[in-house]
Image (cartoon, rainbow, N blue to C red):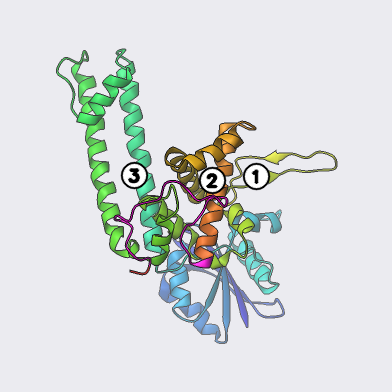
Amino acid sequence: MFYSGIDLHKNISWITTIDESGHVIRQVKLPNDPAYILDHFHGLGGNHKAVVESTCNWYWLSDLLLGHDIELVLAHAKYLKAISYAKVKTDKVDSLTLAQLLRMNLIPVAHQISPELRPLRDLMRSRLNFVHKKISCINSIHRLLEKFNLSSQDQSLRILKEMSIPDDLPMPDPYRFQLQCQMSQIELLNGQISDLEQSLHPHLVPNADIQRLLSVPGIGKISAFTVYLEIDGIDRFPDEKQFFSYARLVPGASNSNERIRHKSGNKDGNKYLKVAFTEIAVHAVQYYAEIKHFYHAKLRRSNKAIARTILAKEMARIVFHILKEQTEFKTFKGITLSKTKTLQWPRLTSPCA
């Protein structure tokens, strides 16, 4: 067995291949051309196992190597840095370090999303990016109106709802033009967001797991899509605690001797699941009295952020067991809700339909 560490960059890669004894067999700098990469591995013969850090451009390399029966391990960049510190750090040294850690089975492994779900997940992340741009445009409109003391909520809502500038708006022409540009961007983004969602419907709406998620209070079409795609198979989480941690719903800790300190806002895990479950919690409080009662009970003993996160964690617990046990939603904390979700699109009459 040969072990190869790949230090992948935008246009070149350093590859170091070692044998089972740790001796360097070959160390080369290659352009990111599939022919050169494959020639390196095939030229050595034998069985290969490779590792690369989880940077933004690992997709093509994974598809290339797996398509030629070469196992590729994805290394978690943050945790790898913690165990591979070196005074001398070059691309050549990094590739050798990766190979040695792979040989000793010390690579902190990052999850590789399923190739079939990868484009759908990235499309959902693009949607969130479009939504952020739309919100930025809306905020810019508010700031522009404030310059002329036109920041009343009614005025802003009227302009944004009608997407037109009133003739009597006391504003010089250059600012009116700026306002029109912002509104045009909002209209463009609305159309792109709608088209993006439409493209996902045939792939995700008929999915049985999506239909099960839609039975959960507070989960709509977009949050169901996000949760399903970001989880990428609930079986990779052995228990709910690991799932909570991955969804950023539990605090970190910084304990030393007699000092005990919780670290909120932990950035380890999946930020998209954190956003999704927080929104699910907010919607559940709005529409379900029993969940609202639970939230306010937590709110009396903590602040809004903590109470919301506790509820988001409970919603994640429900999602975890529904996907694990392949069932639909029944109760919240053992309580049957007084309000149930109607069977209308995107919900189908049967989860397997």
Is the residue 115 above or below the residue 90 in the image? below
Q: Give whichever of 233, 317 is nearer the camera.
A: 317
The amino acid on which the numbered mark 2 sits, given as a three-letter code, is Ala
Assess whether mark 2 and mark 3 are in contact (beta carbons under 8 angstroms). no
Q: Secondary structure at mark 1?
A: loop
Name the mark nearer the viewer: 2 or 1: 2
Q: Which residues are magenta?
A: 325-351
For marks 2 and 1 on the same chain, the one whose residue lies earlier in the sequence: 1
Label 1: which residue?
251
Expressed as whole percent of the image width and height from the top left, the position of residue 329 reads 47, 57
Residue 275 lies left or right of residue 109; in this view the side is left
Residue 305 coordinates in the image, percent (x, y): 56, 35
Element assignment for label 3: helix
**Mark 3 burial class by Cα count in 10 Å: few <14, some 14-19, many 20+:** some
Q: Is residue 339 magenta?
A: yes
| Horizontal relation, residue 154 to residue 278: left or right | left
**Residue 157 location, quadrant:** top left
Location of residue 295 in the rendering, given as x and y in whole percent from the top left corner: 55, 38
Q: Quadrant of residue 209?
A: bottom left
Q: CA distance from mark 3 to mark 2?
A: 24 Å
Whether residue 105 is visible here, answered yes or no, is: yes
Q: Nearer the viewer, residue 231 or 212?
A: 212
Residue 312, label in figure: 2
Q: Position of residue 30 (x, y in %)?
A: 49, 69
Identify residue for label 3.
130
Q: Are marks 2 and 1 in contact (CB under 8 Å)?
A: no
Q: Quadrant of residue 81?
A: bottom right
Where is the N terminus found, in terms of image quarters?
bottom right
> Is label 3 or label 2 in front?
2
